[in-house]
Amino acid sequence: MNSALVKKDTFALWKKNLSSFWSIYRQNSMGLIGMVILLIFALMAILGPYLVDITIMTVDGVTQVIHPPTSEYWLGTDDLGKDILAGVIVGSRVSLMVGLAATAISMVIGTVVGIVSGFYGRVVDALLMRFTDVFLVIPWLPLMLVMAALLGPSLGNIIFVIGITSWAGTARIIRSQTLSVKERPYVERARAIGSGDTHIMFYHILPNVFPLIFANTVLVAAVAILSETTLSFLGMGDPTQVTWGMMLHFAFSMGAVSFGAWWWLLPPGICVVLVVLSFTFIGYALDEVLNPKLRRRDQ
Amino acid sequence: MNKDFNEANNLLSVRGLEVHFAVRSGFFSSLVSRKISLVRAVDGLDFELKKGEILCLAGESGSGKTTAGKAVLRLLEPTGGEVLFKGEEMNAFSKSRLRHFRQEAQIIFQDPFESLNPRQTVFSTVAEPLEVNRLTRDRREKEERVAKALSDAGLSNPRELFMRYPHELSGGQRQRLAIAGALVLHPDFIVADEPVSMLDLSIRAGILKLMVELRDNKGISYLFITHDLSLAWLISDRIAIMYLGKIVELGSADDVIKSPLHPYTKALVSVIPVPKRVSLAGKTLLKGETPDPVNIPLGCRFHPRCPEAQPRCSEEEPAYREITPKHFGACHFI
């Protein structure tokens, strides 16, 4: 056997691990429903601009303003005569992107703070955890609003604001798991063969807290997408971008409720609910798969 | 102490080694009293380990034998005393010397189910020491050294095991894997912390045989930590009996087992199981448990449990001295 074979074996190993994970995951109906919903929205976000004609997003003459669903406009039109269905499809792209990018920021900060704090303990731990507590106890919505208002309405700022306000819970969870993992004998063995702190944190702590990070990521993503909708709805979003939150914002401010224009309010709202629900379903399913103690016997 | 010993033959010389832990008290009790209580886990240890020797540290749980093993490897910072490794004072080790020491001295843990990272493959477990110490960059050479270490540790078809995870191996295979992870660095010295106590009896002999063979072929010295005296007798050249952080008796394996001096050793030796039906009538059974190392008894630390205790024992700590040639003990009445 030569090196090329060891490399090939590594891929085979990943494939094996993935398929054994899938064989447990697919028995979880909640997780499957969540995954199907999320896949539909992901396809919508990726293919959206190719599916709908962007021109129907433009102002389309006075007669079609705030029109209920017709055979031409399946979900009706808004106050400027723009097609709601097209808006929902195009909006999915930005909403998901903002949610995932903010989640990535939040997970990186939460994981680094959690592992470093748990691993070094003492002064480092005390300082980092008091800092984390500050972020935990500050009401996140006003903080987000203030930061978004100060930084100005742009997509980048929204991502930054959501990411920076949602990592504290993750840091706490990762820290507690790190405290347990760092006392295992294999960490001591790693020290005995001469590994440094960084090596131990990266190769021994991180892989063993990773299932927790993974399950947590999905739940944070749900919150991040909801936060984006909230911020946009409250008018802190970028008005030049079509997102579900922005659609709700315009619908509300233009008086969709008093017009009785349900087709204007419901579609973006339902989309947000479905995406958040799918992430939550997947999160709970992952929790069950990665934490065998929660698995039910009859499965 | 035995001074006419040839120092150059000593791989390890331990003098007055102490490891004390401060007991953290709660916030309120720390307001009330300023006293810090200490756990004296290792409380003045003297011994030498010769090149190619197997020295057994034996004692009940709580005697500080594991702590002593970790302290000589600097996995724990000793609070007192000195350890000389190949004649060099370990407290004076520079960072780079300590890095090199990590290649010369290795540890094998008790529980092979806990001492291996469950998310590391066999290959990565054994290759890690090479990578951490930047010993080889060449992938092919690394694979060869890993395969060699695995077969040295008695695992046949090592390359077929490369991509397995520890949970796919049996207990004996796992302990062999842990040994391979130590062997890959070509150490001179291994601390074996109860390496077979978690294994089935049928597998123990194989692991012990492997360890003795490694000593014979590669000249590896062992500090073998165990609570099992019959095992100590089987494998070691010399045995040191520890009680509450101190050595109470040290001598050749035969001397300690066949003619024990210290009452504590006598009690331990008398309960070594023999494979036949016996009654416990004539055995010395120790009263009670090992005391709390926070409050070590005054005088001889063994006197509250000693079947031969005299009034003097609770007042005066016995000296650790050579009683017959190369056989040391700490008791007033031997």
Image: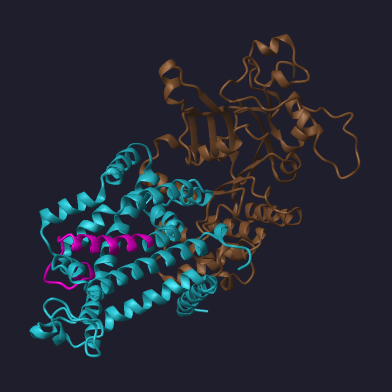
Q: Residue at x 71, y 36 (%)?
A: B252
**A80 or B53, which is in the foreground?**
A80
Q: Is the stretch drawn in magenta largely helix, strand or loop?
A: helix
**A117 or A212, which is in the foreground?**
A212
Residue B120 seen in this snapshot: no
In which quarter of the view is residue B244 placed? top right
Q: Is residue B83 left or right of residue B202?
A: left
Q: Residue at x 80, y 38 (%)?
A: B272
Q: Position of residue A22 (x, y in %)?
A: 50, 74
Image quadrant in which the C terminus of chain B is located: top right
Q: Residue furthest bottom?
A: A71
Q: Is residue B78 left or right of residue B95?
A: right
Decide whether residue A100 is among the magenta residues.
no
Bounds of the magenta segment = A219-247
Image quadrant in which the N terminus of chain B is located: top right
Q: Residue at x 39, y 57 (%)?
A: A202
Decide whether residue A231 is among the magenta residues.
yes
Q: Number of callouts in the render?
A: 0
Instruction: Decide: is A122 above or below A279.
Output: above
Q: Position of residue A295 (x, y in %)?
A: 57, 62
Chain A pictured colour: cyan
Residue B215 seen in this snapshot: yes
Q: Position of residue A249 (x, y in %)?
A: 18, 66
Q: Is residue B143 left or right of residue A162?
A: right
In which quarter of the view is residue B241 placed? top right
Chain brown in the figure, letter: B
Q: How is the image coloured?
A: by chain
Q: Is residue A89 left or right of residue A152?
A: right
Q: Position of residue A2 (x, y in %)?
A: 49, 78
Instruction: Decide: is B272 above or below A193.
Output: above
